[in-house]
Image: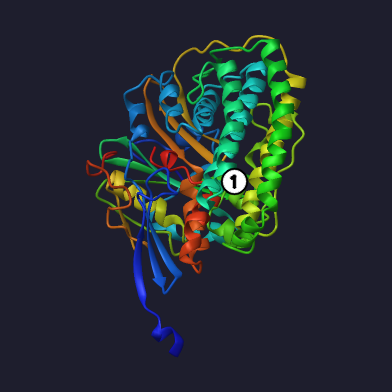
Amino acid sequence: MNVCFAGILEEEMSEQTAKMDIREVEVRDLFSEAALIRHDNWRLIQICATKTADDLYEILYTFGRGYEWKNLRITVHGDDKIPSITKIYEIAYLYENEIHDLYGIEIDLMNYDFQGRLFRTGVQYPFR
Amino acid sequence: MADNSLKKISIVPFGPQHPVLPEPIHLDLVLQDEKVVDALPSIGFVHRGLEKLVEKRDFKEFVLVAERTCGICSFGHSLGYVEAIEKIMDIETTPRTKYLRTMWAELARMHNHLMWLGLLADAFGFESLFMESWRLREKVLDLLELTTGGRVIFSVNKVGGLRRDVTHEMLQTILQTLDDLEKECRVATDTFLGDKDVLSRMVGVGKLSPERAEELGCCGPFLRASGVRRDVRMLGYEAYGDLDMEPVTSLEGDCYARCKVRIEELYQSMDLIRQVIAKMPGGPIEVPVKGNPDGEYMARIEQPRGEALYYVKANGTKNLVRYRNRTPTFSNLPGLIETIRGAELADVAMMILTIDPCISCTER
């Protein structure tokens, strides 16, 4: 299925990312995809956000098993609310709070919500 | 139940300024009498936003910024960054570049581990060992200065290769110094590991099982001390694929095991440097770099404190879209909090030091 993010087709994206195993998923599927990955004994390695255009952000979830790793990616707008995966990976709260504090992206139902005070930056949402 | 009801719950702030913390991190320790029942971390006191600078700096210049993330892991940060850029641009560096990078990475690991040992000894009140560790570390810094010109920031890495080469005489000096250093280090580390105070305060304290260490995303010596045999150097980046090495592990998962693993890694680094020098190829130290990067890659390297990730996304211009550095200390924070839960308040400072936190990296 061709999924279109910001006018770029999935095939084109996978060509750009040929050196990294990245699978694009819809925001609504993130939680269930993460649950399946966890079920297969993959650990969470990191989550990071990237601003790719005005009001458009990619969020990359990296998972590892032994030395193997793979990635999931969602694309969101700045005022979207995304689901927390802390119910599946308890350590995700650090990365999710970081994304909230630096990019201002709202994350729903984190197990530890620092309310914007994990990173005490002088400027609110400096990476936005 | 009746016993618990008599115990008083209190919250004690730990840090950001604390005698054992060279850098600011804050923990709210929830105490039941003298026992820690929970800990909540706060960071970001000195967050610099270095990652944001990639939008304004040329990707070749940015290696100098990436290196300045931290004064201890500086070489590794520049290495991770150039690895990511070189992968995106399909640049194959020369064999000599790979061997020299590996040598410097291991020298940096040695100076990190000796610095850590000194800080831990200082926190114990073991002043003579603190001074001895840092005296030995000076010898490693002298080698780094001899070969790179810098003691803290080396600035030898660049996209496509290196800025400086080393001479045969320099390599011989390194070998000679390592032989002397190993003998002196053995005296210091054997004393430390055999000391009855060290044993009584560390053995069985702050235990973390391998299953929990994996679940909590731990990495580096912290992870390996819990018996998980994972070291990113085994992936064979740079010259590691040509070297004979096995991850150093311990099964106990306590504070003492974390110390043992780091100390054993100190000697492992000496062995790896000897192997590198014995196999050091000749030839050039750089290849031409044409154009700008276009694509994305996440490089992984084993920093002294554990696995560090360097994600780079580029769009074909000289400025990058994103540079992301996931540092080992950031990944080790949940594991640290887990080990602190159930500990005595008096042990918290020492337990923090056994994961060797680097807040400068975390506050990139």
Look at 41% across and 50% down and name the residue there. A95
| Above or below, B4 relative to B100 | below
Q: Quadrant of the C terminus of chain A?
A: top left
**Residue B254 location (% of width, % of height):** 62, 59
Chain designation of label 1: B
Q: Is residue B9 left or right of residue A38?
A: left
Q: Residue at x 47, y 55 (%)?
A: B349
Q: Is residue B163 above or below residue B269?
A: above
B146, above or below B255, in the image: above
Residue picked out by circle 1: B220
In the rendered structure, the answer to whether residue B148 lies left or right of residue B195 reads: left
Q: Residue at x 31, y 50 (%)?
A: A100
Residue ranking furthest to the bottom: B2
Which sits in the foreground, B120 or B336? B120
The image position of residue B136, as x and y in percent, is: 61, 32
Q: Helix or strand or loop: what does disc 1 sit on?
A: helix
**Residue B46 versus residue B60: which sits nearer the camera?**
B46
Q: Nearer the viewer, residue A51 or B3?
A: B3
Q: Amino acid at mark 1?
A: Gly
